[in-house]
Amino acid sequence: MLSTQEIKETFLEYFIENDHYLLENHSLIPDEMDPSALFINSGVHTIKPFVLGLRDPPATKLTSNQSCIRTRDIDRVGQSVRTLTYFNMLGSWSFGDYWKEGALEHAYALLTERLHLNSEYFAITVFEGDEQIPKDEESIKIWKSLGIGQSQIYLKPAEDNLWSMGEVGPCGPCTEVFFDRGEKYGKAATPGDESPRFVEIWNAGVFMAYNRNKDGSLDFLPQKVVDTGAGLERLAVILQSKQSVYDVFPLKELSDIILSYASEDVDEVSQRVISDHLRAATFIADEGITPSNKLHGYVLRRLLRKAIYNAELIGINNFNALVNEALEILDSDKKLKQSEHIKTTFSHEYNAFSKTLRKGRKKLEDLLSSVVSNKLAGEKVFRLYETYGFPLELTRDIAVERGIEIDMEGFERARERHKEVSRKSADRSFKGGLAEITEITTQYHTSTHLLQESLRQVLGDHVSQAGSNITNERLRFDFYHEHSMTSEEIEAVENLINQKVMENLLVTREILSYEETKTQGALCLFDADKYPKDGVSVYRIGDYSLEVCGGPHVESTSEIGRIKITKEKSSSKGVRRIYAEIVAEENKK
C-alpha cells in the first residue's frame, strides 16, 4: 500500500517523466496583485497569470503539488467525511500542447498503470452541453477508446461540469473521474452527490477553449489550455482503502492524539473539526499571520476558536500540550518555518478565548434550549456577543449544527443601535477624546496619531482605535489587540514615536470625501454614515500617519516633546489600554 507521500511522489514523477515542468509549492497567500481570494484555493489559482496571458509559463507543460485553503465549506467540516479546509492539490497543465486525448490518456495511464486502480470502478462525468457549448462527445469517445463502458459515463449540467475562472474570462467543459466504492455506500447514488459511495479522485481535464465576455457571449481563446487537479487526501482514501479523509496521514495521527487528550466521550464531529482546523490554522500561522478581526487573521481566529470550542466539548484540558504534539506531526508532513510563532500565537488565543468561552457557553446553551420556532432572536445573539465577547460566527456555527437559524436582521439592528449610542457618547467626550483644549492636550492629541501608527507598525495592521481620553497630565489610548504587549514591543513603539518627533514632520489638514479617505488609506474610526456628506477632515503627519480627525493638532511633531509609555494593560476583552506622558521640557526638540 502506498503511503500518502508516495502517492504524491508517484503523481509528480509521472508528469516529470512526461516532460512537465515542476512548479514550486506557492505560499498560501496569493500575490499582492491578485485580490480575488484571501488564500490560494486551487492549483490553477497559482497559474492564473499564465492562463490569462499576463505572463509566459516557464514551459508549455506544467505539474505541481499545491497547498490550498478553502473556507467556503468551513461549516461542513466535520459533518462531511471528505471536506477539508486545508488540502493538497496535485495538478498538471498544458498550454497549447496536448488537448483532450493527451490529457485523458495521461489520467488513465497514471491511475491504472502507476497507481494500480481498477478502471472497472471508475465513474466518469462529462458535460452534457447547453445552448452555448455542445455536449462533450470528444471526451466520451476518448474514454470509451481507453476501455470505459457506456454505463460508467454520466452526463452532467453546466453547474457541475462547466468550469469558469470567473464571471468573465477563460472557461470550458470538464470531465471528472470518480471511484465507485459500491452499493453498500448508497444504492441510488450518482457521482457528485452527497453520498460517500462515489469519491472524486481527479478532475482529469478542464478544457479551456472559450473566453466568456461581459455580455455572456463566448469567443474562442487564442490558445487552448488543459487544467487538471487531484486532491491528494481523496486519492489516499481510495488507494489506502480508508473510510474518509480523516483516516489518512496526517489527519489520522492528529485524531489519535486528540483522542488521547479527551476526558469526555468523544464526538466524531468534534474530533474531525479539531483535526482539520488545527492543521489549517497551523499552516496559515506558518505564513506569519496572527489572529485578528480582519482578512487572513479573521480566518485564522475563526479556525482556532472553533477548534478550542470543540476541544472544550470533549474535555481537552491541556490545549497547549495538544498543539505541541500536533506541530510535531504536521512538521513531518510539511516542514514548518515558524514553529515558535505558531505555539505562542495559539497559546495567546487559547488563553484569551477560553475565558470567554467558559462564560458564554452556558449562556448560549440556555438561549438555544429556549428556542421554540427554530429561530434565535438577533438581539439576544448581539447581547451574547457584546456582554461575553462570544463570536457571532461561532454562535452561528453551533446553531446551524442544531438546525437553528439566527435572525441576522435583528442582530444588525441591535448592533446599529449600539453604534449610535457609542457615537453619541464619543461626541460628548469632545473631539479626539480631549477633556479640554489646551496647548498640552493638543500635543497629546497629535501624539495619539503617532501612537496608533506606531502600534500598527510593531504589532500589525489589525490594530485600530477603540477609544481615547486626553487630559493635561497624560493620554490614554485603547486599541484592539488580543494579548498584552511585551516590554520589547512597548520599547519599539515608544522609540518609533520619538523618532517621528525628532524628524519634525509637518502636520497638515485636508478636506476629503469619505471615499477619498478610503482610497488614500486613511484610518477612520466610524463608517461613512457617521461623517458629514460634504467632506471629512483628514490630518496627515508627514508620510507616516493619515487619519480622519476633527483636530486640533500641532503644526509639526517637534512641538510635542519626548513621549514615555507609562503603562499597558487590558481594558476589556480584545482591547488593550496604553497610558503615556510627555516628559521633561528640556528634552523637547
Image: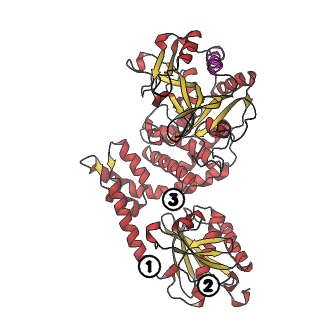
- Give the residues drawn in magenta, as a range: 97-118
Residue type for callout 2:
Gln
Residue type for callout 1:
Asp
Q: What is the CA distance from the residue labelled 3 to the residue labelled 2?
A: 34 Å
Name the N-terminal-most of marks 3 and 2: 3
Q: Tell me the residue at 73%/21% (across/down).
A: 18
Location of residue 54 with respect to 501 vertically, above or below: above
Tell me residue 74's x, y (percent).
48, 42
Q: For the C terminus, which image quadrant?
A: bottom right
Location of residue 208 with respect to 413 vertically, above or below: above
Horizontal side of 389 relative to 71 (left or right) equals: left
Query: Which residue has dot 2 on it?
Result: 443
Query: Which residue has dot 3 on it?
Result: 352
Horizontal side of 152 relative to 459 (left or right) equals: left
Which quarter of the picture shows residue 202?
A: top right
The dot on residue 427 is 1
Tell me residue 543's x, y (percent).
69, 71
Residue type for callout 3:
Ala
User: Circle 3 sits in a helix, a strand or a loop, which is it?
Assistant: helix
Q: Tell me the residue at 45%/16% (across/down).
A: 182
Tell me residue 126's x, y (percent).
50, 21
Residue placed most toward the observer, 351 or 170: 170
Q: Tell me the residue at 47%/47% (across/down).
A: 306
Residue placed most toward the observer, 263 or 147: 147
Q: Tell me the residue at 70%/72% (across/down).
A: 496
